[in-house]
Image (cartoon, coloured by chain):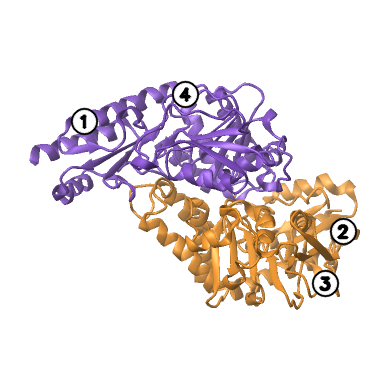
Chain colours: A orange, B purple
């Protein structure tokens, strides 16, 4: 039985991508060699990297002057690289704190300079997105996190920003149409909508770099990686390849506008059931609900074993909520089909009927 | 036709490992889910990480007190992490410069403190390993590179070191029996003898950490990763899995003593031919020749096209020398079978016969 994979990340990828990736591990490009045993400088792999970078530009509709990079270290290393590259000596930055990952990003910046927390939803376990905050005019950059997987919240309207605008889009990049050029720097760990764990996409507006007066260690300097087209050192070959395949799948099916429509349908279907079904309660503020991760509680814990047995019976995988929220979290990333959400909703209804 | 893969890295991996990796991308552990679409916190993946760490300890025969980590960023990020974690504020370090990678490591340390270059073979294009040097007694650590892929040199006898002993073993770890406990910190990009590109093995003696007085950024601090067993953030799942399979393959076949014997045979076979065949000349100092990478020149460039056509005809792949040395480089990492070296030697002999 094929599982319905609601894992929060690493998460479901398109079945055809998995099939191509599996084949490439045995024989890539009909070379009679594996993808993972050839030089990253071979024309076959250089072509993969070129296509991956080109697909990012095309799908995000980036004009000239933006450089996509495929790096390593996850969003967590970007928490450090962002202030290193953008915070001036003696400068300061503004952070919006919408979850523990946003908090970790803020803490890393605090080790390098002054940080103003312009909004913080820690008071309600990050169940909402702060609004109406003011970003000081003298900060070097503003940093926010577009989607918060643990709490199931998502920024629907980004603030107007007069300084450099930085966004951690790890868990919702490529899922919805927004004007990506409102940002000067976007980063995202691959392992949600883009590919497997092991690479991080960074997109930066070239002109913002080199202006801090800081000495930046080689590997933490974005200009190192831009100048070598993400090949300063050996890139994470497999993760870049599978990301490229996933972006190609997205493009061939219609791009972000196509997937956004499906993502809206999935979220609508599940949140409607959470709100309708008297046995469940959503945990996030309604207006801030994420289309990627829906968090909900079972009102009466007495039914837990039965509900979870029904989930297992129905092939529902990865629905456990994060320990800091509890309950359930249905992650509905790009590759999750609408039918999987329908399968979950059917179980929720059947559980109500039997209760 | 199966190729003979002499690629310098990423490089050949055992065929059975590639087969298992390919299968796991479709269906891992009979979960009906791909390895790359499940949570890294699932018991199935945690078990992979545990086994990988355990295999490192066992194969390197490490006693209690050493922690292996699977990180990201390649050896290049370790060039920065090593001084961050080991060089005291206002301290200094000693570096042995045996190639451009050793030089890059040295340069990264220089940005953080004083560096003494105790030996340097740049005068002869790094074609030999400096010897007879003195390591000052007041340095915080000594750093060397055990094998230099570009130049085909390898340290045969490591110096006796009275300070912390650090070694970049990216291109020969797990290839020969040495007393690994003479080192306090070993690091190695996976993509030679351990697995695919995308993860870096770091082995550190726990007691040496936390003594510099430096504030270390979270992701650059080894204690971050040790305390979370390489799961502080999402690890590079696929690269760790394939590394684990490769280490398991090494153990099941007899461990490092088994592979060292084969590696010696391969090197002996090829270097004997390089020395015997009047059409070729080895580039590295004989006593410092690497068992991993044999670099050699064709004496008369007029025969280049013919020789390379014969290589292609014989399925020999990845034999181009690095641009800074020229000629040919036969990389004979652990997974390269003796038969592949024999195939190359046969072509060299046939080329001589026809010349």
The reply to whether label 1 and label 2 mark residues of one chain is no
Give the residue at x 89% y 48%.
Answer: A301
Cα–Cα span, label 1 and label 2: 70 Å
* Front label number (3 vs 4): 4
Circles 3 and 4, Cβ within 8 Å, touching? The answer is no
Circles 4 and 1, Cβ within 8 Å, touching? The answer is no
The reply to whether label 3 and label 4 mark residues of one chain is no
Give SS at disc 4.
helix
Cα–Cα span, label 1 and label 3: 75 Å
| Left/right of residue A130 with respect to residue A140 in the rendered view | right
Q: Chain of mark 4?
A: B
Image mark for residue B275: 1
Circle 1 Cα neighbour tier, 10 Å, few/some/many (<14 / 14–19 / ≥20): some
Residue B340, how many percent across, how many down? 28, 35
Q: Chain of mark 3?
A: A
Give SS at disc 1.
helix
Give the residue at x 70% y 63%.
Answer: A87
Q: How many marks?
A: 4
Give the residue at x 69% y 66%.
Answer: A167
Frontmost residue, A220 versus B245: A220
Cα–Cα span, label 2 and label 3: 17 Å
Frontmost residue, B283 versus A32: B283
> In the rendered structure, which disc, 2 or 3, sits on the residue that comes first in sequence?
2
Picture quadrant where residue B11 is located: top left
The reply to whether label 2 and label 3 mark residues of one chain is yes
Q: Which residue is the site of mark 2?
A: A122
Q: Which residue is the site of mark 3?
A: A287
* Front label number (4 vs 1): 1
Compared to B170, does A312 lie above or below?
A: below
Residue A51, how many percent across, how many down? 45, 65
Q: Which residue is the site of mark 4?
A: B255
> In the rendered structure, which disc, 4 or 1, sits on the residue that comes first in sequence?
4
């Amino acid at each position: 039985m094929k599982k319905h994979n609601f894992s929060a990340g690493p998460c479901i990828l398109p079945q055809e991508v998995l099939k191509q990736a599996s084949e490439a591990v045995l024989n890539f490009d009909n070379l009679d060699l594996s993808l993972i045993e050839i030089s990253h400088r071979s024309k076959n792999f250089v072509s993969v990297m070129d296509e991956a970078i080109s697909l990012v530009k095309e799908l995000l509709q980036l004009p000239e002057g933006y450089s996509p990079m495929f790096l390593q270290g996850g969003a967590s290393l970007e928490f450090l690289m962002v202030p290193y590259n953008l915070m001036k000596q003696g400068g300061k930055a503004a952070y919006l704190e919408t979850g523990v990952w946003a908090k970790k990003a803020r803490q890393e910046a605090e080790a390098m300079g002054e940080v103003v927390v312009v909004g913080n939803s820690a008071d309600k376990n990050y169940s909402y997105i702060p609004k109406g905050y003011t970003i000081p005019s003298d900060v070097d950059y503003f940093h926010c996190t577009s989607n918060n997987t643990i709490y199931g919240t998502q920024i629907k309207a980004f603030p107007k920003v007069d300084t450099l605008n930085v966004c951690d889009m790890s868990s919702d990049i490529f899922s919805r149409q927004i004007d990506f050029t409102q940002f000067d720097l976007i980063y995202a760990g691959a392992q949600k909508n883009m590919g497997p764990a092991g690479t991080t996409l960074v997109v930066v507006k070239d002109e913002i770099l080199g202006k801090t007066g800081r000495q930046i260690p080689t590997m933490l300097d974005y200009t190192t990686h831009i100048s070598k087209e993400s090949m300063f050192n050996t890139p994470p070959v497999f993760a870049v390849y599978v990301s490229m395949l996933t972006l190609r799948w997205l493009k061939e099916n219609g791009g972000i506008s196509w997937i956004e429509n499906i993502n809206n349908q999935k979220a609508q279907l599940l949140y409607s059931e959470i709100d309708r079904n008297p046995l469940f309660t959503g945990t996030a503020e309604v207006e801030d609900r994420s289309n990627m991760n829906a968090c909900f509680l079972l009102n009466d814990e007495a039914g837990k074993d039965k509900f979870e047995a029904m989930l297992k019976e129905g092939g529902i995988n990865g629905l456990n909520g994060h320990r800091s929220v509890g309950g359930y979290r249905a992650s509905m990333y790009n590759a999750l089909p609408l039918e999987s959400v329908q399968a979950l909703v059917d179980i929720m209804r059947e559980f109500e009927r039997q209760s």
